[in-house]
Image (cartoon, grey):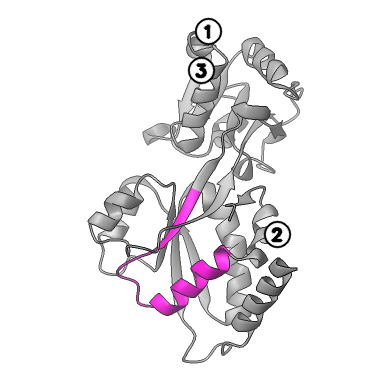
Amino acid sequence: MRARIAAAGLLGMLGSLPQGGAVAADLTILTNQGATPGVRELAAAFSQASGHKVTVIQEAGAALERRLNSPAPGDLLTANPEPFEDLVKKGKVVAGTVTPFVLAGLGVSVRAGAPKPDISTVEAYKATLLAAKSIGYSYGCSGTHVAEGIEKLGLTEQLKAKTVRTGTGAAGGPVTDHLARGEFEIGIQQTNIMVGMPGTDYVGPVPGEINKPCQSNVALLTASKEPEAARAMIAFMISPAAAPLLRKTHVEPFPR
């Protein structure tokens, strides 16, 4: 009941804001790859309810650094937790606004049309990894967690020779891009950036305790030209009303 009241209250507040006109803000959210699908869903809902325009831009690496060092980088930043302490120290992010909002679990995909392996249990997942001719995962948060899971299974050395790591330099792009080109047999990454990708078939989530989700936080950029609207966006992103929108993109809201 409390969740329904909170959601109704927030949506009522957003709906009461002026639609369009000179008072409408123009927000830019810089996102990490793993948070982008969910942020786009939330941005569309927030824009419709508030009248504010919300642009979502996925940036990473050197491009993100250049953007953050520019005079007008945007209004909000989403990222995995690790960078935020340094960004606060550098004055790029407003202290006290760093807010966890989403958890994205790991999933497995194969090339389109390929047989889907059994990953229904931890033991089945282990057997599938051992039987695979090649396995691909990234250097990002999901890749780190995949590697940790493989270590828990005691397979690090056994799988090393047939493992392909993606996500940096010429090997950039989502794991599914490489999987679709046939660069490896099985791809593992965050489910929300794997489901429905062309040239691949999603198999299912990594099972049990081996599935350690990736957390994304959101924070207000110090250089924001629309801090009030940006703070309202953060409030919406962690509200009960945001939960079903996030779940549409195969992630879970951060528990509160």
Determine which quarter of the picture holds residue 238: bottom right
Q: At label 3, which amino acid type do we have?
A: Glu
Mark 1 closeness class: few <14, some 14–19, many ≥20 residues within 10 Å = few
Q: Could you tell which of marks 1 and 2 lies nearer the N-terminus? A: 1
Measuring 42% from the left and 79% from the top, which residue is drawn there? 228
For disc 1, the marked residue is 158
Amino acid carrying mark 1 in the image: Gln
Left or right of residue 201: residue 179: left
* Alpha carbon separation for disc pair 3 and 1: 10 Å
Viewer-closest of 152 and 56: 152
Of the image marks 3 and 2, the number of the one nearer the N terminus: 3
Q: Amino acid at mark 2?
A: Pro
Outermost front residue: 2
- What is the quadrant of the N terminus in the image? bottom right
Circle 2: is it few (<14), some (14-19), or many (20+) Cα within 10 Å? Answer: some
Q: Which mark is residue 239?
A: none
Residue 70 counted in the magenta span: no
Residue 181: tell me if it is visible: no
Distance of label 3 from label 2 (alpha carbons): 34 Å
Identify which residue is drawn at 68% across, 12% down: 127
**In the image, which residues are magenta?**
216-238
Residue that carries the numbered disc 2 in the rendered image: 244
Q: Nearer the viewer, residue 240 or 69?
A: 240
Dot 1 falls on a residue whose secondary structure is: helix
